[in-house]
Image: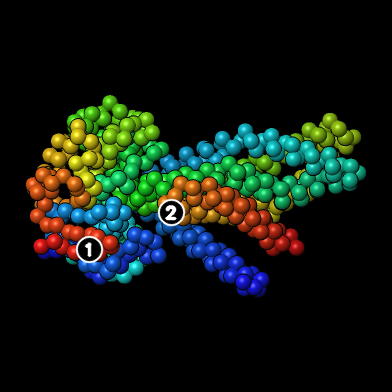
Amino acid sequence: MKWIELEDYVLPVSGESPRLERFSFSISKGDVCWLDTGVTEYAHLFFKALATLAYPLEGRYHFAGERLDFLKPDSILPVKKTIGYITTHSALISNRSLRENLTLMRNYADNDLSARIDDETFDLCRHFSIADKIDLRPEDLEQADMRSAIVIREIRKATRLLLLEKPEIYLGHAGFFLYDWLLRSLMDKGVPVVFTSDDKNFIDSVSNRALVLHDGRLHERQ
Amino acid sequence: MSITRLIGRRTIRSFSHITTLLTFASMLLRMLYRRPGEGRTLVRRVALEQIYYTAVQALFVIIPVALIIGSAIIIQFSKLSGQYDLGNIAVILIVRELGPAITALLIILRSATAVTIETGYMKVLHEIDALEMSGINVLWFICIPRLVGITTAILFLFVVFDIVAIIGGYAVVWTVTYLPVGNFLRQIAGAITVADIAVGLFKAVCFGITITVTSTYHGLNVQKQITEIPVAASRAAVECFFYCLVINVLISALFYL
């Protein structure tokens, strides 16, 4: 079954650049797609389309068989929170501490102001060496710590699709081993993944599909 | 391009901008009415924080401003009117017109610009995207607390401004004129009506909505560049002030003409 399907997609809405030519794309459970693109902006736009952050001018988006209605943005929010989005465009909320950032989604969904972080998330914070910085705000953290927190936040979602930008350099060499292990454990569960990477070993070891995105044109490499 | 075409194009653009703002305002008011179940506790907390920043912290600015303006009005009009009808003049000028307008101006200078800059930064730094990817409704989480906070703050500060300006006037009357203070207070008590207070409060609510809608709209409309933020803040402040003045005149005309 196609888990996610974008049909006859055209974006962005306004005359901005970069621009993706009309394309169709689908991904099923267990698919791990490597996106080969020379220009980062195209990858960002494609990721935004998959993450439903960029609304199309034309086309249809089906998520787990349901067609998304971009005229009702509220109806897309439950889909958004199941998409792990780990790119250089991912961010933490700057006027909240790391703890608040990690509990924000739960606080919002459950109407609960508790600042308690669950054990599994706290274990991840310990592994990524940010447990002692949990009450600091993003401005007081190193970039690697912020990115570690983003990885934890996104992986701890009930992830049904994972979008990754160059995982081999996202956390630096020091954090890659743990990050790689986390990603592989999600892939083993069948979570579909789309990623960009320049690391041939990583690409060869995880991907089972390859997409090429050049000059705004997307096609699958056979 | 001919001058007619230029004027026509500008008029269409302004009309389109105002209809966009009205649509945005109606979206926010509908959301406030609907009050989605998710995030209510968080939204309430952010609204309380906004009231603290906009109302409580602004007290240290609005009290001296109200004292200065109240005193100046009483000094000028005690000379002009020969101290007759001083209470009436104080009520007409302070409660009906200057109170809401000066309060709105202070809120625009202190909070509207801050809201535009904050939301603009959130947009440029992809924090708005991060909220959406966490399943958080941005209008509910970002705009509604500011709408509630700023509107409540204007209502509260409007009352404070009126009381302090009139008490400032009272102090001036007591120190620099021969008018018996009891007479001045009697004039004020006689001049002020329930309608004056109700219209003042109505103006404050309209200003609160206008300021929040305009400032959050400009903040959320920032696209990619950090250099867009000061432009958005400046436009938001000027527009807020202009719209508040227009609304002030319209409401005054509606109720007092």
Q: Quadrant of residue A110?
A: top left
According to the picture, the residue beneath numbered tag 2 turns out to be B223
According to the picture, the residue beneath numbered tag 1 turns out to be A218
A123, B200: nearer the viewer: A123
Residue positioned 37% across, 47% down in the render: B126
Could you say whether the residue bearing mark 2 is in a helix, strand or loop?
loop
Could you say whether the residue bearing mark 1 is in a helix, strand or loop?
strand
The kind of residue tagged 1 is Leu
Q: Is residue A207 visible?
A: yes
Residue positioned 23% across, 37% down in the render: A171
B105, B122: nearer the viewer: B122
The kind of residue tagged 2 is Gln
Q: Quadrant of residue A169?
A: top left
- Label 2: chain? B
Residue positioned 20% across, 43% down in the render: A167
Within 10 Å of disc 1 (Cα), the crowding (few <14, some 14-19, many 20+) is: many
Q: Above or below — where is A162 with respect to A214? A: above
